[in-house]
Image: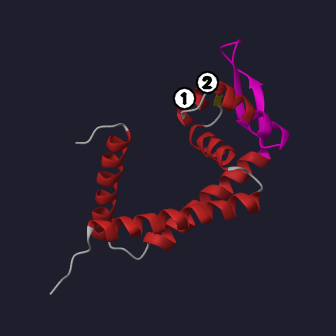
Amino acid sequence: MTTHPSAEATLDKVLALSMLVTADMARFEAAERVTGPRLHLLWQLGMSGPCTQRALADALDVTPRNITGLVDGLVDSGHVTREPHPTDRRATLVTPTPAGAGFVARLRASHADLAEQLFGHMTPRQLATFTRGLDETLERFARLMDGDQA
């Protein structure tokens, strides 16, 4: 006879996973000496390549003032530079330095390694089922956070 977990037991597991992910992120941030928001900005630059501060603010869903502070910190730490925009003289491009690009490469490698360690043992069908369940849960939670009880 197969027993099915309760909704509360499942939520407890999701919360436990969230705590583990948070602890792993904290260890990575401490080891790399980069704050979470700066790490997120560097990840975005790694995905998009050089872009304006406005584009970064939109992508990270933060204010332009917050982006200015984050970019200032990353300029100071040698991860990014501000370069003239090639077609808009009013704008600047936030561009990874070689050190910043190296950091993003390490970040991507770490991300891929963790993904393999967590999910590499799953069959494609298991992974697809798990992903579908996560997608549905994330969508429902986002609606709940927006005040939609549907």
Q: Nearer the viewer, residue 55 or 47?
A: 55
The x, y position of residue 135, in whole percent, is 33, 52
Residue lying furthest bottom in this view? 1
Q: Secondary structure at mark 1?
A: helix
Residue lying furthest left in this view? 1
| On screen, residue 88 above or below 139 | above
Q: Nearer the viewer, residue 16 or 82?
A: 16
What is the spatial separation of the Cα atoms under label 1 and label 2, in whole angstroms? 6 Å
| On screen, residue 90 above or below 72 | above
Which span is picked out in magenta?
A: 70-98
Q: Nearer the viewer, residue 100 or 129?
A: 129
Q: Secondary structure at mark 2?
A: helix
| Residue identifier under label 1 | 58
Quadrant (top left, top right, bottom left, bottom right) of the N terminus: bottom left
User: Which residue is rendered at x = 76% and y = 26% of the image?
Assistant: 83
Quadrant (top left, top right, bottom left, bottom right) of the C terminus: top left
Q: How packed is label 2: few (under 14 Cα within 10 Å), some, or many (20 or more)?
A: some
The x, y position of residue 33, in whole percent, is 77, 55
The reply to whether the magenta stretch includes residue 87 is yes
Q: Which mark is residue 77?
A: none
| Residue identifier under label 2 | 54
Q: Amino acid at mark 1?
A: Asp
User: Which residue is rendered at x = 26% and y = 42% of the image?
Assistant: 149
The reply to whether the magenta stretch includes residue 80 is yes
